[in-house]
Amino acid sequence: MIGNSRKSRPSKIHVALSDARPHNPKEVYRTKGRPPVIVGYARTSTSEQRAGLDAQVRDLKASGCEKIFSEQISSAAAKRPKLAECLHFLRETDTLMVTRPDRLARSTHELLRISEELAQAGVGLVIQSMGLDTRNGSNPTAKLMLSVLAAIAQFERDLMLERQREGIARARAEGKYKGRPQSLDRAAVQRMRADGIGPAAIAAKLGIARSSVYRMLGEAAAA
């Protein structure tokens, strides 16, 4: 009996979701032939309110985004998992849409790199705050806008951080700066509860809200 010479296909394809490496939207492991998709990406830093992320998602949906990737993570983070997943999902003829350039990139250099990779792969880029739309092909004016406006966004962020540092320094000089609040001691809460101390007494001893005590105890019980 002649054996089957066909090679078996892997049942799963493992893809590392890291935006530290280049992405090629043409290299996809999905069924070909689907219509073009407008994909949105939304991000706020972990210190920002949830409302900011919700506002971005709302604006992206209103502009026709059919699929949206969102995350709350600092732009300074080495890896942004949802951005990596978003870039991997994109394929030729798709469009990537963001509300502002600093939601997508950390710097002018990174913004230009991402836009160039998307252009080479046949993926359009729309940045709402800039009125930028590269879906019509190579556009020198669009590239100039990307460079100038991304630089402005970085400049504004630097100014904000400088004002923040000045405010902290002034508060310290006036004796008003207390620093970041101490992190909740979950181990202490569980230990005190095991000793028979009630939630209200634990909250009073640790100087935290009773709701925080109940939350930590609930999380410990569910673990």
Image (cartoon, rainbow, N blue to C red):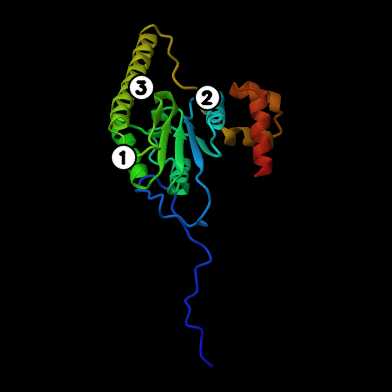
- Residue 3 vs residue 51, the one in the foreground: 3
**Residue that mark 1 sits on:** 113
User: Is label 3 in a helix, a strand or a loop?
Assistant: helix
Choose the circle earlier in sequence order: 1 or 3.
Answer: 1
Q: Is residue 1 left or right of residue 111?
A: right
- Residue 57 vs residue 143, the one in the foreground: 143
Could you say where residue 26 lies in the image, as x and y percent from the top left?
40, 52
Separation of marks 3 and 2 at Cα, in angstroms: 16 Å
Q: Is residue 58 left or right of residue 26?
A: right
- Do the residues under discs 1 and 3 have CB atoms within 8 angstroms? no
- Residue 218 vs residue 164, the one in the foreground: 164
**Residue that mark 2 sits on:** 52
- The outermost residue toward the front is 136
Mark 1 or 3: the one toward you: 1
Separation of marks 1 and 3 at Cα, in angstroms: 20 Å
**Residue that mark 3 sits on:** 157
Residue name at image x 46 percent, y 35 percent: 97
Q: Amino acid at mark 2?
A: Gly
**Eyeballing the image, is 146 above or below 33?**
above
Say few, some or many: other residues with alpha carbon within 10 Å of mark 1 (under 14 / 14 to 19 / 20 or more).
some
Mark 2 or 1: the one toward you: 1
